[in-house]
Image: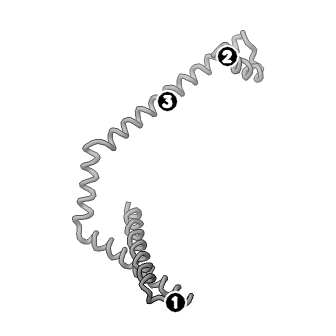
């Protein structure tokens, strides 16, 4: 580092001349900074490995299973989620039917009914997903 042309140029641009005490002190500071950054990277990698090990551990899998079991074994939670999904699906169908009727589309065709089923399913699933996210 001390003999690096780039370092020399940068330090000289700041008025720190080569082969001076000030230059030696600057090189020492840069080396300490570089070592500190390296140590921080090593620590960050260690933390990431520790987190990965935890997330992939049996303890984490059991904790997730326990939460899922609790949610799905409680009938009131399941019923509430389902009610929210059904209401969202019905609302989306009503809105699409009104829009199509106003646009003069054939709302009795099999193709349109298939389209409504798709809208209902999508709105139902999205509402349940949003409900799950808001519960966290």
- The residue wearing badge 2 is 4
The one nearer the camera, 79 or 15, is: 79
Q: Position of residue 80 (x, y in %)?
A: 31, 73
Measure the alpha-carbon separation of dots 3 and 1: 63 Å
The one nearer the camera, 52 or 28, is: 52
Name the image quarter holding the N terminus: top right
- The residue wearing badge 1 is 101
Q: Earlier in the sequence, mark 3 or mark 1?
A: 3
- Please name which of the two marks, 3 or 1, marks the residue nearer to the observer: 1
- Using residue 58 as the reference point, say whether residue 51 is left or right of it: right
Q: Earlier in the sequence, mark 1 or mark 2?
A: 2
Callout 2 secondary element: loop
Residue 50 against residue 135 in the figure, above or below: above
- Using residue 47 as the reference point, say whether residue 9 is left or right of it: right
Name the image quarter holding the C terminus: bottom left
Residue at 52% of width from left, 89% of height from top?
101
Measure the alpha-carbon separation of dots 2 and 3: 24 Å
Label 2 environment density (alpha carbons within 10 Å; few <14, some 14–19, many ≥20): few
Q: Label for residue 10?
A: none
The one nearer the camera, 33 or 4, is: 4
Callout 1 secondary element: helix
Label 1 environment density (alpha carbons within 10 Å; few <14, some 14–19, many ≥20): few
The residue furthest top is 19
Q: Position of residue 116 (x, y in %)?
A: 43, 80
Residue at 29% of width from left, 46% of height from top?
60
The quadrant where residue 90 appears:
bottom left
- Please name which of the two marks, 1 or 2, marks the residue nearer to the observer: 1
Residue at 39% of width from left, 73% of height from top?
121
Q: Position of residue 95 (x, y in %)?
A: 48, 83
The residue furthest left is 73
- The residue wearing badge 3 is 40
């Amino acid at each position: 580092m001390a003999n690096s042309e780039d370092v020399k140029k940068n330090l000289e641009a700041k008025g720190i001349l080569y082969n001076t005490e000030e230059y030696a002190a600057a090189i020492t500071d840069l080396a300490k900074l570089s070592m500190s950054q390296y140590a921080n990277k090593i620590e960050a990698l260690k933390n990431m490995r520790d987190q990965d090990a935890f997330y992939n551990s049996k303890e984490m899998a059991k904790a997730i299973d326990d939460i899922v079991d609790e949610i799905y074994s409680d009938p009131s939670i399941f019923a509430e989620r389902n009610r929210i999904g059904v209401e969202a699906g019905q609302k989306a169908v009503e809105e699409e039917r009104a829009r199509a009727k106003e646009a003069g589309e054939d709302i009795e065709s099999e193709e349109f009914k298939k389209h409504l089923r798709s809208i209902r399913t999508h709105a139902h699933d999205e509402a349940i997903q949003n409900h799950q996210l808001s519960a966290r």
